[in-house]
Each structure stands twice: as C-alpha cells, then as structure tokens.
Image: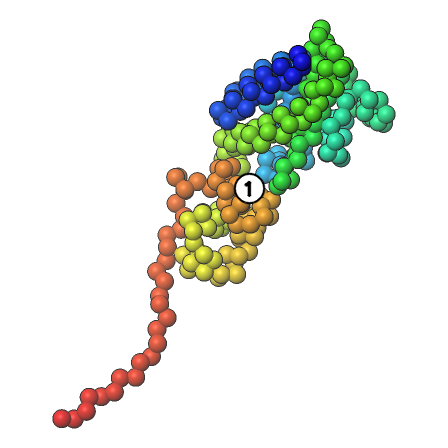
Amino acid sequence: MHNEIVLNGVLGEFSGRILQSSSSVELKALLGDVLAALGYRFFGYHVVKHAVLHDSGSDRLPIGIFNLPEEWAADYVSSNHVDDDKVVELALAGKTPFHWESELARCPMTPKQRLILRKAEEAGLVDGYTLPLVSRDGEIAILTVFPDEQTKSFAQQKYNENLLYVLAQFFHIRALRVVMEERFVSTRGRKRSFLSGRERETALWISRGKSSWEIAQILGISEKSVEFYADSVKRKLNAVNRTQAVVKALLLGLIDDADEQPSCPKPVRSPTRSVQVSAPASP
C-alpha cells in the first residue's frame, strides 16, 4: 500500500511538471526530486550518440543532464572517459536496462575501463542501474540512477524498475530536445558549418513551402541540384523526409529565418510562344 501511494505521488509530480520544464536546470530539478522520492541520490542523463551533435574526433558525446558529483563529472569530461566507458559500450550494444553489479562483473574490461569504474566508486557512484534510450530517429541516450546508500533497499529497487522505465522514456523525449537546443546555442557558429551554404539555402526555401522547381529558379541552379542538396540535408540530419529535415535544421539553429537572408529570387520568365499574326484584310 505504501509503495502504491509513493508511486502515485511520483507519477503525479512528474506528469505535472514535465511539460512545464523547458531548460536543463528545470529538468534536472524535476528528475532529482522524483528520483529522491524513489530512494535514488544521483542520476545521469547522457546523450551518447547523435547525428548532428557529434564533436570531431569522437563518436560518443559527453553531454546531458545530471546531478553527479561535480569533481567526478569534471574529470570525466576533461579526461574524455566517454570514449572508453564500459557502461556506454554496453548501452550502445543493447536496449535492455542493466545493473552494473551483475553486468560488469562478467564483462572483460581494459585497464582504462577499470580505472573509470574505480573513479566512479570513489565518488560514491556504485550499484548503478542503466536504461538505454533509443529515439525513433536513431539518437541514443542513457539514464543511470544510483541508490542512496543510507536508505538502499534491493526490494524497493526491483519494485521501481518498471516505473523507472516509463519515467525515463518520457524524460528522454523532453530532455533530448532541450539538450540539443542548449548545445547549439553555445556552439552555434561552429555548428552552422555542418551544412554547406547551398544546403542551408535549399532547406530555408523548403521551410517557406517552395517546390524543387521554384527553388531551382530562385537559386539559379538545376532542379536536379536542388534534389541533391535536399537529400544531403536529410542524410546529415538523419531525417526520413524533407519536412522532418527542415524541422530539425530549424530546431538545431542550422538555419534561421530571422537572421539569414537567402539568395534573392531571380525573375522567372514565362515560356514564350511564337504567334502568327495575320495582316488585316484590305478594305
């Protein structure tokens, strides 16, 4: 009975605040409060893989929302541990949630991977429970929670697992967008080069509802070239169609109708036809 009361309270608080949370600070406070009610002290929401957010030289990302010990988090990022983290490796390899204690015990690890885990233990990050989160468009994140050692209960943790799965999925939907937006605000100039000038122009005119033929006339290029640039934008953004590609480009700040003026439309001549004009008949 007590567990049901706690569960209902957690769900009520989460559903009441999730849609109102529009920044990483608000989402951090929300998840921290909800998880604390379930007996968890630390958590880390980590965007592991994203087609657009990748930094050069690495195929994994060290960004997200977390309340982990600051000194440990700073060392994790500065040491680029994300590239060697065994937990991240396991999350990328499968979609099933796992407990660190049981899963890591049977996995072979490199000396560097063992060092990363030892640092986590020294920071109080033990008995982690990791949930891989995969979006429809291929973005991958993980949510790892750590129980409060003073109030830890194995039975309570097992009871929480289904609820954690549901909370993690809804949190991921909201948090991924916030992380993407905030990341691009901070690195906007560098990330704008992700799309070429022609790709940005093509995407911008698509966002204004122009067809391939119209864009070709506006930019003074062939319709086939427009299709090429549009397909390139879709591929780079992992989009299934033009509409989704444009939405992603706008969301990520890769195109901006407010401060970027596309090429001025060029006058389009209507096709002319030769007309035979008969001379007027003599009166």
Figure disc tally:
1
* Viewer can see residue 128: no
Q: Quadrant of the C terminus?
A: bottom left
Tell me: residue 238, above or below residue 183: below
**What colouring does the structure picture have?**
rainbow
Q: Residue at the spot x=74%, y=11% of the render?
A: 153
Disc 1 marks which residue?
Answer: 194
- Residue 49 position, x and y percent, is 65, 34
- Residue 273 position, x and y percent, is 35, 76
Who is closer to the viewer here, 56 or 130? 130
Residue furthest out toward the bottom: 282
Q: Secondary structure at mark 1?
A: helix
Q: Residue at the spot x=48%, y=61% of the render?
A: 222
**Residue type beneath disc 1:** Phe
* Viewer can see residue 93: yes
10 Å crowding of disc 1: few (<14), some (14-19), many (20+): some
Tell me: residue 267, above or below residue 126: below
- Residue 90 position, x and y percent, is 76, 30
Q: Residue at the spot x=53%, y=29% of the render?
A: 178
Q: Is residue 176 left or right of residue 220?
A: right
Residue furthest out toward the top: 150
Q: Is residue 235 left or right of residue 16?
A: right
Q: Quadrant of the N terminus?
A: top right
Tell me: residue 182, above or below residue 241: above
Who is closer to the viewer here, 277 or 192? 277
Quarter location, residue 146 = top right
